[in-house]
Image (cartoon, grey):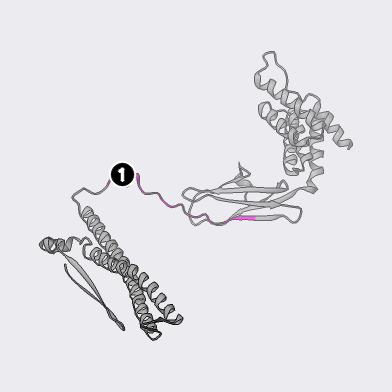
Amino acid sequence: MALAAVLAALATAGAVPARAADESGAEAAAMALFTEGRRLMAAGDFADACPKFAESRRLSPGVGTTLNLALCYEGLGKTASAWLLYQDAASAAHAKGETEREAAAKARARRLEPDLLHVTIAVAPQPSEGTVAIKLDGQPLPEEHVGSAMPVDPGRHEIEANAPGKQPWVSTFDVAPGPAATLTIPVLIRRATAPDAADELSGPPLDSPHEANGTANGTHDAEGNMKRIGVIVGAAGLTTLGIGLAFVLAANNEKENAQAYCNKNGCTPAGQADLSRSGTDADIASVLVPLGIAGVAAGTTIWFLAPHGPHGDASRSGARSSAHAGFVRIAPSITANRWSLTATGAF
């Protein structure tokens, strides 16, 4: 506590940026921020005080401001940040011949050293040449720090690695009390090369083989799509027709069964039930059978009217009139015990 009091006294003395006759706006802003930071830190509000000191130091660097920012970070538990700032303050004080401040900053830094947490950031051997640029918490990491244990603040950190022609690699890691950890940046993945803009904008001549192939492929796709549609529609129609004919057979069978329970005077309850079911099945069949016939006819027509590729153009033009005159006739044949479906046509 005594050392903290001494440090606070040293940080306050002469800490306010010097006032010149032509004091600039930046210096005035730095002084205001420093004063507000001191007030907040005295109240124990380190979270709000530290940004004030940091901005004041950016506008007007000074030993006193650096010492106060280090003290603020120490209050937040950012031991590594505080330790580095104490080192900076000691160097700056030494350059100015301020031995008392230099000694105080060095003593504070030594006191933090046992509590410092360390991490080693390594880079896996990369298959291609090129420097891997690393950022730690958004700040560039000097090359000399790679592969060496360095102090970091407790908590979560973000690391980013970039290299020419490679995809960025980003990860997060947590630092907690314990043995020093090592984080290895893996081999960076090659970035997919974008197509040449000139190649995208320029295409083959309109009369080139590429255009002909594209047209042929488009026609072939249209033919395949229409034929698939024809198959689907025809299959659905055939299924519907089959179900409808099944209801026809059921209606006939139920009607025949009812005759055993009916005479000229009427029908028994069992006979009446068979007649009722027969009527219901006949009504359903009267809807499904025409729908099924229409579906089969539509699917067949779509199949045969599908466009042909360029190899079939000659034969198609020769048969154009007959194609337009094509027809499909589907005739079901139904008896009491069997049914059949006959399709005839010309294309």
Task: State yes or no: residue 199 in magenta.
Answer: yes
In which quadrant is the N terminus drawn? Answer: top right
In this view, the residue farthest toward the left is 318
Residue closer to the observer: 35 or 124:
35
Q: Is residue 234 visible?
A: no
The kind of secondary structure the magenta stretch mainly shows is loop
Residue 214 drawn at (x, y percent): 25, 55
**Range covered by the magenta-colored residues:** 183-202
Which residue has dot 1 on it? Answer: 201
In this view, the residue farthest toward the top is 21
Residue closer to the observer: 293 or 130:
293
Residue 250 in the image: above or below residue 16: below
Left or right, 141 with reference to 127: right
Residue 182 in the image: above or below residue 281: above
In which quadrant is the C terminus drawn? Answer: bottom left
Task: State yes or no: residue 162 in magenta.
Answer: no
Residue 129 drawn at (x, y percent): 48, 52
Residue 235 in the image: above or below residue 269: above
